[in-house]
Image (tube, grey):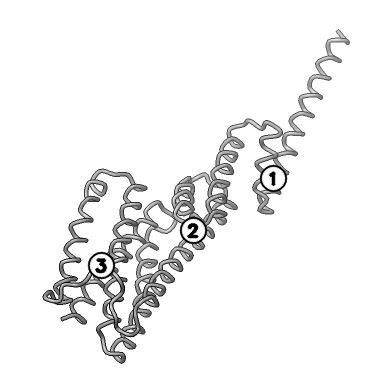
Amino acid sequence: MKKLVGMFTACLLLTGCGTESEEQIKDKVIVALENEEYEEALSLIEENSLADEETKVLSAQLQEFNEVKEAKSQADWDRVLEKAHSLLENPALDNNLKKELEGMIVEAETEINKSIRESFEQNSANGDEEGNPPPGEPEDRSVSLKEKYLAKLAEVEESVKEFDEIFDQGIQVEMTAAEGEIFSKWDMLLNEIYADLKKTLPPNDMSKLREEQRDWLEYRDEKAKEAALQYKGGSMETLQYVSTQAQLTKERCYELVDLYMK
């Protein structure tokens, strides 16, 4: 009997030690998270085969978080937004990861807007200051500049109809991608309109328009941020942001053609 009791006690002691060791590892994981050492936290979980449900959930979150970090390291900002917003939809997301992801979203949106602005400024700088048309197809002088761009506006309006089915039946990620394509189409046309105005407007008028356009770019981005705020942290945030940019850019195209072209 004494032998059996001794063996049972030994088993309890061994079990207790095992549990204590696991708890110590979990404490280390928590410390790693608080110190923003996310790869270390994931390594501790995987190396020690922690398999309780709570730790499994955290492990999955850390793996997805690493995918966002990888996209960031490659400057794939669209992918950062897509994956970060998807991960933020998880109500059980660790608070430390949530803060990191929110910071990455802000950085991604800043970089995307910076790229758009630089592209616009580059296209503007490439315009011929002497007023000479760039190499390419000769223009039909019998068609006014306004008529030419009214036709281009109609072409873009027609081309974006291909995305109607996505907005009717697609999922959120597809709709965000579609809005990105629509925004790109209107942004390209806006740059083209602006480049032609540089060649046709008197210098004083063009100088005023240049300042006006810079102010408008800031206005557009601020309005897009305001519109997206109502969905802050949700899956609709990026969709609303890009959608607002696309709509305002479209309106600006019509405005420039109407006000400055004959």
Q: Quadrant of residue 8?
A: top right
How far across and how far down the image is residue 123, in percent?
Answer: 37, 72
The residue depicted at 46 percent of the width and 54 percent of the height is 81
Which residue corresponds to mark 2?
105
* Residue 177 on image: x %, y %: 35, 52
Q: Is residue 258 left or right of residue 60?
A: left
Q: Who's the residue at 20% across and 76% down the image?
A: 257
Measured as percent of width and height from the top left, residue 260 is found at: 21, 82
Residue at horizontal 12 percent and vertical 74 percent from the top: 143
Q: Is residue 178 left or right of residue 65?
A: left
Residue 109: x and y in percent read 45, 62
Q: Are marks 1 and 3 in contact (CB under 8 Å)?
A: no
Q: Residues within 10 Å of mark 3 (few under 14, many from 20)?
A: many
Quarter placement of the C terminus? bottom left
For the residues marked 1 and 2, what is the alpha-carbon distance in whole angstroms?
23 Å
Q: In terms of sequence position, does the residue under pointer 1 or pointer 3 come before the other? A: 1
Q: Quadrant of the N terminus?
A: top right
Rendered view: 13 above or below 1: below
Separation of residues labelled 3 and 2 (CA atoms):
25 Å
Task: From the image, tell me which residue sits under label 1.
Answer: 40
Classify 10 Å Cα crowding around label 2: few (below 14), some (14-19), many (20 and above). Answer: many
Helix, strand or loop at label 1? It is: helix
Q: How many marks?
A: 3
Secondary element at tag 3:
helix
Q: Residue at x 31, y 52 (%)?
A: 178
Amino acid type of the residue that numbered disc 1 sits on in the rendered structure: Glu
Residue farthest toward the top in the current orientation of the protein: 1
Q: What amino acid type is highlighted by mark number 2?
A: Ile
Q: Nearer the viewer, residue 68 or 76?
A: 76
Disc 3: which residue = 250
